[in-house]
Amino acid sequence: MSEQIPLKNETPDVVEFDLYQKRKKIYTRSIKGTFNSLRTYTLWVLMLGYFLTPWVNFGERQGVLFDLPARQFHIFGLTFFPQDFFLLAWILIIAAFGLFFVTTLFGRVWCGYTCPQTVWTMIFMWIEEKTEGGRNQRMKLDKEPMSASKFRKKFAKHGLWVLFAWLTGITFVGYFAPIRELLIDFFTFNAHPWAYFWVGVFTVATYLFAGWMREQVCTYMCPYARFQSVMFDTNTLVISYDAKRGESRGARKRNADPKELGLGDCIDCNMCVHVCPAGIDIRDGLQYQCIGCALCVDACDSVMDKMGYEKGLVSYTTENRLEGQKSSILRPKVIGYGIAMILVMIGFTTVMGGREPLGLDVLRDRNRLYNETPSGMIENIYTIKVINMDQSAHDFEINVEGLEPMTLIGRTQVNVAAGEVRSVPFSVQVPPTALSEQKNKIFFSVKSTDPDYEASKVTESRFIGPVGN
Ligand code: SF4
Ligand code: SF4
């Protein structure tokens, strides 16, 4: 007789939870301290850099100008063209290795001190505090029904937020269109519709990201926050709470001896939580929401000071140090990222050093394979683009060879202004007897004729003739 397994009609406990949690507004308390001062200095440097750079001229033009219609990118005397775009790949690789290197050593310093989301949020929080008051006043204000005084405060806050967001937007567009003219055209309604569009997009994005979404951007939108843990190891600098020293946490009188009360050094004041822009409790351990701003370190240090305890209950430390082990700076990962970064930087410098300040593009007229002239010559039409990447104007001579005897009809002597591209139409004529194939290689060359400036460039092209020559 076969045994039957008894079936149990038991339903497991079902726990319902919402996948889309409503954002809980974070009311942060401002705090003074070493790391907050460091963040403020960084903020000033970055803000001044961002807002003033478009106003700095270099030579006769804006120092940094990404002129998209002209396909020229001017960066303090250097002009880059679309053909230089491979340099951008070098720069991005250097930046990536730099970020890996810094993150492995110092954790999320980029997020805590220099990320635009952090910096702009700091400014928006500062505006909020100036218009609505400190943490407790803001919490009280939000609970109050609407009144003239509440409306005034909210209006001032949002007005200033929008103004700062607009300044951010117009400055950003000022990197792509000369900012002096842009400002005048913007207010006289003569700016290009795209200028209004992009200023609008950046204004709205700044207002939403720094004013409303804040830590949500770091927690849910930023990919770096998610993958950086891969770069962390037990020697990476992180902000951490020393649970061995802090626990058991609990309130006590200032002069009370914690040992007698069976308490650790944490007085459970929640100051570290109140200052946290991510709204987390560092005492719960390392969390991915932590942006490494170190405000909880400042907060806890100020509490420790008041209590007469040693600072550093919350501090920059490493997992190894917390475990009582030695931390090492030079690890294989750090050395690897460092070497990779240095090698790519050497490569980039070599490429930049060997970059010729002269470019030559040859475009063959594709509408017609060839023409036959009344005098019996075979003719191909070209447009030659001479790109002068130098900082001064120069005279150039254009030539062609490869199918002698050949005639170049067009303007062979041209003057090209600094950082400009000059297009010249040309006709090349060859007697049919000089063509042995249908597709023939020819070489265009451009050479400076200025006595004190040496530059030349050669580009290969095709000359098409009749079949079966
Ligand atoms: S836990 Fe500390 S370091 Fe992390 S985000 Fe909050 S205040 Fe900044
Ligand atoms: S600030 Fe320091 S003492 Fe206060 S709760 Fe946080 S860890 Fe404890």
Image (cartoon, rainbow, N blue to C red):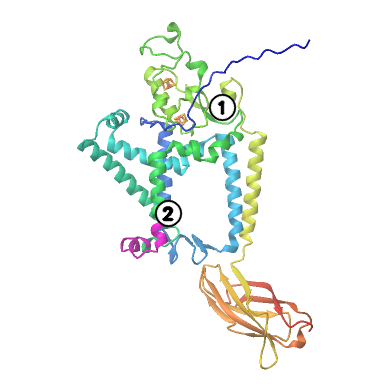
Q: Residue at x 32, y 49 (%)?
A: 163
Q: Can residue 145 be found in the magenta stretch?
A: no
Residue designated by label 1: 318
Give the camera-side residue of 52 and 124.
Answer: 124
Residue 287 in the image: above or below residue 223: above
Residue designated by label 2: 172
Q: Secondary structure at mark 1?
A: loop
Give the camera-side residue of 410 and 244.
Answer: 410
Residue 229 in the image: above or below residue 81: above
Res 52 visible: no
Residue 4 in the image: above or below residue 320: above
Three-letter code, disc 1:
Thr
- Farthest residue, direction left: 148
Image quarter in which the C terminus is found: bottom right
Q: Which residues are magenta?
A: 182-198
- Farthest residue, direction front: 1
Q: Secondary structure at mark 2?
A: helix
